[in-house]
């Protein structure tokens, strides 16, 4: 009886001392968004995570074809449209400049004219704009 009790305690001790399985860290789903200046024809596509994090246009698209410099040497991101080019089902994205949200993109609506006038090519400076994407698994 003493031997069986010792064996049981040894088994319990070995089970509780076993390392816990490592948590699974799934990488965030990625979305490819293209920003275009339809006046000049310049456009750039970049991948951003669809994890609700705020991605600054000036950081994500720095030193690309749409990163133009104004006369004082500061970056400007003069863009007329945005488009999702690669994305998982259920994605939704929006752009925001301060508290103003605009440029809504979804799986069903993958293109947006940023001046809201399909008849004109108005440019928006996105230097202070964030892009935030999320995937809904409904």
Image (spheres, grey):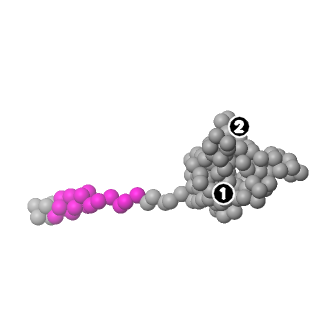
Residue at screen point 70% across, 55% down = 35
Is residue 27 toward the left or the right of residue 30 in the image?
Answer: left
Residue that protrudes farthest toward the front in the picture:
71
Residue 33 among those drawn in magenta: no
- Work out whether residue 25 or residue 8 is closer to the camera in this orientation and state it: 25
Is residue 3 toward the left or the right of residue 86 in the image?
Answer: left
Dot 2 surroundings within 10 Å: few (below 14), some, or many (20 or more)?
A: few
- Work out whether residue 132 or residue 69 is closer to the camera in this orientation and state it: 69
Residue 18 among those drawn in magenta: yes
Residue 80 is situated, as x and y percent measured from the top left of the image, at 77, 51
Dot 1 surroundings within 10 Å: few (below 14), some, or many (20 or more)?
A: some
Q: Is residue 137 visible?
A: no
Which residue in the structure is indicated by mark 1? 65
Q: Earlier in the sequence, mark 2 or mark 1?
A: 1
The answer to the question of whether label 2 and label 1 lie on touching residues, with beta carbons closer than 8 A, is: no
Secondary structure mostly taken by the magenta-highlighted segment of the chain: helix
Residue at screen point 62% across, 42% down = 74
Q: Is residue 45 visible?
A: yes
Which residue in the structure is indicated by mark 2? 100
| Span shown in magenta | 7-23
Find residue 121 and name its label.
Answer: none
**Picture quarter with the C terminus:** bottom right
Residue 130 is situated, as x and y percent measured from the top left of the image, at 63, 45
């Amino acid at each position: 009886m003493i031997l069986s009790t010792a064996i049981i305690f040894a088994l319990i001790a070995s089970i509780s001392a076993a390392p816990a399985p490592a948590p699974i860290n799934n990488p965030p789903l990625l979305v490819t968004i293209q920003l275009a200046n339809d006046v000049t024809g310049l456009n750039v596509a970049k991948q951003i995570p669809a994890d609700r994090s705020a991605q600054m246009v000036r950081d994500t698209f720095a030193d690309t074809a749409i990163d133009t410099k104004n006369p004082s040497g500061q970056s400007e991101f003069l863009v007329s449209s945005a488009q999702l080019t690669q994305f998982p089902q259920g994605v939704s994205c929006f752009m925001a400049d301060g508290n103003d949200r605009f440029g809504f993109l979804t799986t069903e609506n993958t293109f947006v004219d940023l001046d809201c006038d399909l008849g004109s090519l108005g440019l928006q400076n996105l230097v202070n704009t964030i892009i935030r994407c999320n995937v809904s698994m409904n």
